[in-house]
Image (spheres, rainbow, N blue to C red):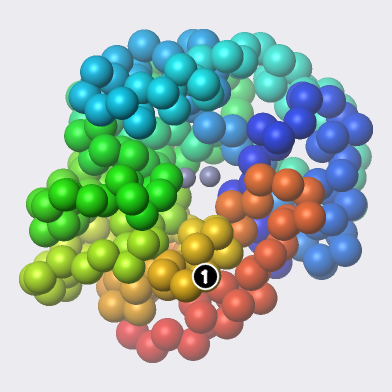
């Protein structure tokens, strides 16, 4: 089994820290784990976030706390060191890059050529709105418009040709806000774009683990069905941010993916 979405960011980029994740992967019977760090952590990606700053205070405060404080070279040094060792679990290293329409060339320039195994694209912001941080931020938000922009942005991400996979598609529903219209047409469009780009899609249980009362587990069944219909590879993912969460929900994710009929 694979856990395709694990963050090391809670500790230093050392082999000791990494090996805690590897040990947990062994305990949870993972064959492969994919480590990926958020683009916003790194100084090299900071210029890309200019497009969401100055629009609302929450996003500005968040970025001033979390954004651009780390050096990519430190992460890459750990990747190099890990590759010189051998582990009972297959390790792959990548980045989870926030997707912004218009930043495709920047991402290509900054992230391709680093020698990483993969790049995953994520929609984490809708025109500066950090929709997945807390439910209070949704107060006064036009939910229909948020959904439209989220899926339009997701389709552009898939069409950009910059990424190997799309992270947690459909995470927009995590606080239980739903649009007044059917999402079927968007699901179809997104699945088609992901398939045409040869990308994979994650069945990611992370939002459900964070917000079990409101967040559905992984993709909406209809979206998952569309992905399967289009022959998209689905990978299971925990979105772990600690060693303890490696492998969390992977059994459930696998079961869901295997049982959904096309
Ligand atoms: Zn994410
Ligand atoms: Zn993540």
Q: Residue at x 25, y 28 (%)?
A: 56
Task: Determine whether 181 is above or below 189 in the image.
Answer: below
Q: Can you give x and y, in whole percent of width and height, for residue 145 in the image?
A: 10, 52
Q: Quick check: 180 left or right of 35? A: left
Q: Residue at x 72, y 57 (%)?
A: 245
Task: Determine whether 123 is above or below 94 in the image.
Answer: below
Residue 138 can be seen in this image: yes
Q: Quick check: 210 left or right of 31? A: left
Q: Can you give x and y, in whole percent of width and height, for residue 71 in the image?
A: 62, 12
Name the quadrant of the C terminus: bottom left
Task: Determine whether 93 is above or below 57 in the image.
Answer: below
Q: Can you give x and y, in whole percent of width and height, for residue 62 in the image?
A: 44, 27
Label 1 element class: loop
As rendered, which of 213 and 15 lies closer to the eye?
Answer: 213
Name the quadrant of the N terminus: bottom right
Q: Residue at x 34, y 18 (%)?
A: 48
| Among the 4 quarters of the image, the one containing residue 29 | bottom right
């Amino acid at each position: 089994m694979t856990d395709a979405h694990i963050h090391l960011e809670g500790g230093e980029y050392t082999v000791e820290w990494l090996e805690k994740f590897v040990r947990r992967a062994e305990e949870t019977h993972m064959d492969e784990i994919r480590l990926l760090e958020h683009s916003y952590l790194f100084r090299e990606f900071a210029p890309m976030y200019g497009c969401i700053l100055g629009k609302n205070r929450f996003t500005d405060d968040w970025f001033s706390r979390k954004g651009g404080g780390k050096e990519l070279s430190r992460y890459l040094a750990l990747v190099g060191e890990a590759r010189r060792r051998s582990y009972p679990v297959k390790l792959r290293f990548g980045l989870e890059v926030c997707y912004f329409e218009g930043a495709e060339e920047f991402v290509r320039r900054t992230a391709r050529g680093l020698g990483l195994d993969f790049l995953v694209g994520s929609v984490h912001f809708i025109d500066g709105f950090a929709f997945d941080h807390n439910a209070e931020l949704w107060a006064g938000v036009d939910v229909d418009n948020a959904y439209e922009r989220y899926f339009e942005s997701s389709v552009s991400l898939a069409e950009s040709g910059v990424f190997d996979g799309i992270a947690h598609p459909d995470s927009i529903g995590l606080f239980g806000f739903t649009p007044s219209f059917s999402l079927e047409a968007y699901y179809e469009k997104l699945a088609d774009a992901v398939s045409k780009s040869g990308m994979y899609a994650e069945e990611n249980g992370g939002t459900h683990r964070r917000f079990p009362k409101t967040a559905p587990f992984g993709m909406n069944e209809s979206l998952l069905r569309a992905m399967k219909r289009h022959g998209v590879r689905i990978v299971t993912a925990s979105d772990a941010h600690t060693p303890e969460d490696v492998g969390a929900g992977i059994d459930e994710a696998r079961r869901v993916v295997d049982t959904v009929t096309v």
